Each structure stands twice: as C-alpha cells, then as structure tokens.
Image: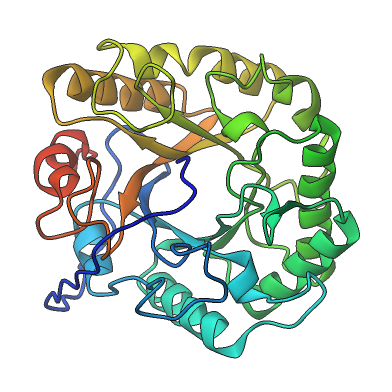
Amino acid sequence: MRFTQLFLAATTAVLALSVPTKIKKRGHKLRFFGVNESGAEFGNQNLPGVYGQDYTWYNLSTIPEFINKGMNIFRLNLQMERLVPNSLYGPLDPYYSGNLTEQVNYITSLGAFAMICPHNYGRYYNNIINDTAGFEAFWATVAKPFKNNALVMFDTNNEYHDMPQSLVVDLNQAAINGIRGIGADSQYITPEGNSYTGAWTWISSGNGATMGALKDPQNKLIYQMHQYLDSDGSGTSTTCVNSTIFENRLVAATQWLQQNNKLGIIGEFAGGDNATCLAALEGGLQYLGDNDNVWTGAMWWAAGPWWGDYIFTMEPPSGIAYTDILPKILPDD
C-alpha cells in the first residue's frame, strides 16, 4: 500500500479475548491466508514518535477471532527507525522491540505465522538505503531474538521503489545473508521487488530479469508481490477495473514463478465492497489456489486499531472488510 503519512483518529476497540479452537483448513488450497496489521509504522514523519499518539501496536484480542475464521498468518508492519534507531548498525530499541516481541510470541503461541515487515520502502530516515553491509547488520540484529521460532517470517522491506534494480537485489541478498548468518535457518524469508513489488509489473519492472538470482542456503525464499485491483494498482480506490482483474494481473508473475521454480505470496491485496470487486477477489483467490504449486498464500490490506472508516479496513468488529468482504472470501472448512 502506497502512503507517506496517515492522518487517522485513534480509536481503540476492546474485544473479549477468546481462545481459538484450531486453525481452519484453507479451502482455496492456499497454505497461508491472513491479514496485514498496520499502525506501528504510522507517524513516520515524526521519529521516533510517541506510542499511542503517533503510532500504535495491534489488538491482540483480535488475533484469535481472525484465526477462528480461517486465517493463519499476520504481517506485522513496523518502522525501521523505531526498531533500530539512529544507525543500521545499532542495537534494538528495548521498548519498541519489546512490543514487537510480545506480538510475535502471542501470535505464534496460537500456531499462526508472524511476518516481521519493516514498512520503509527501501529507505532509512527518508534516504534510500545504499549501505548493504548496514542492511545486513540490521537484519542480523532483528532476526536474532527469533532465530529459534520457525513460525516467524522475515519480509526484507515493504515496497522498494524508484531505486536502481541492482541495489534492490543487493539489499534483498544482504537481508538473507544477515538472517541466515545468525543461525535463523528455519524461517521463510520473503524478498520484495522494485516498483512497489507489483505482481502485474513483475516482468515489466525488471524484477523478473533480476530477482531470481537471489541465493538462500536454506532454500526457503517466498517472493512477495502485492496486487490491487483499481485502475493504477495503487489500492486507493474501491472501484475495480473489472470482475477478472485480480486473476488477469497475476498471470505473468505466475508464469515467472513456474518457469523459474520459485514460490510466491501476495503480501497485500484488497478490493471494494461491491459486486465487481467481490467477483474479482473470489476469482483471484481461486486462481492462486489453482496454482498452489507456486503460490503459497495471500494477506489482506489491512487491519489495525487506528484505521477508522478506511475503505478496506479489516479490523474487528465493525471494519467494512471484516463484516462485508471476509465472509465471502474465506477459505472453505
């Protein structure tokens, strides 16, 4: 999701904590089906910012609700400068990292996957990250506390864009090296491409020609792509191009995954609460399931306690995507 700064009213939904009975089987055959949790990256023009004023963490009481509906993966968006402030080579901030650890431990204690995602667009303090050694050090620091938790995933960075293609590849490889270098061998890593890592532009952007060169000694890479259904693919409108646009925009990326023997995941997707978008969402998820030899899953954008009346909010109990769209796109039992 492309955004620079969010001006949202802070609202807190207090939900009864329920214990999930099990993680339901995904009927569209996707191994991973879940949602983005967004809010810890808010207020990125005010760093480090004040917790509860500039940014927030996530309602843990919603996690069992999502799991009971069939979700099993949560992409935890965060801000690099708050997690490792001042320098890529620095230590973890004890308070911000403590909140992250609490979230990860709770989610994984329920048997679900927690994906750690720096929502930074390949930037650090608004500057393009050119220091690959520093990026490797950052990821070694971030991954180390979770190296023994196989239910954690690492997303190298959200939506690199307007950067040299070779730099995007090098940063992804540096992240992989940093993670594996500290002994985190059991976790999946999701590299992201340039040009906002769009599935529909995976080939035309140059990602297809370059990203396949990434190396992982554990062979546990899942290429993360994002796909929205509005005319410019930005995810800023509830109007979908047509009822097959989700599937149509996945075809070229699917062929690339198949031809290169790679795995993929849709890290962000969304559409409006209308007949055209609902048909597109259902068709796209079915297409992913029909091609589950290469596609592993999909995650909705987005949930989080500060989204208010956002057009795609999945936050329980009253988010429009939670009440109106999720029941129509849930995996079958």
> Residue at position x 76%, y 68% from top?
138
Relative image position of residue 164 (x, y in whole percent)? 81, 33
Residue 148 seen = no
Q: Horizontally, is 38 left or right of 139 in the view?
A: left
Q: In the rendered picture of this protein, how many numbered marks are placed on residues? A: 0
Residue 271 seen = yes
Relative image position of residue 330 (x, y in whole percent)? 21, 40
State whether residue 126 is above or below residue 262: below
Relative image position of residue 119 (x, y in whole percent)? 55, 55
Quadrant occupied by the C terminus: top left
State whether residue 275 is above or below residue 15: above
Relative image position of residue 174 (x, y in whole percent)? 83, 53
> Residue at position x 41%, y 72% from top?
54
The answer to which image quadrant residue 238 occupies is top left
**Of residues 243 and 181, which is closer to you in this image?**
243
**Of residues 12 and 33, which is closer to you in this image?**
12
State whether residue 208 is above or below residue 93: above
> Residue at position x 85%, y 44% from top?
170
Check the image and tell me how it is coloured: rainbow
State whether residue 63 is above or below residue 276: below
Residue lying farthest bottom? Answer: 94
Quadrant occupied by the N terminus: top left
Q: Horizontally, is 130 left or right of 1 in the view?
A: right
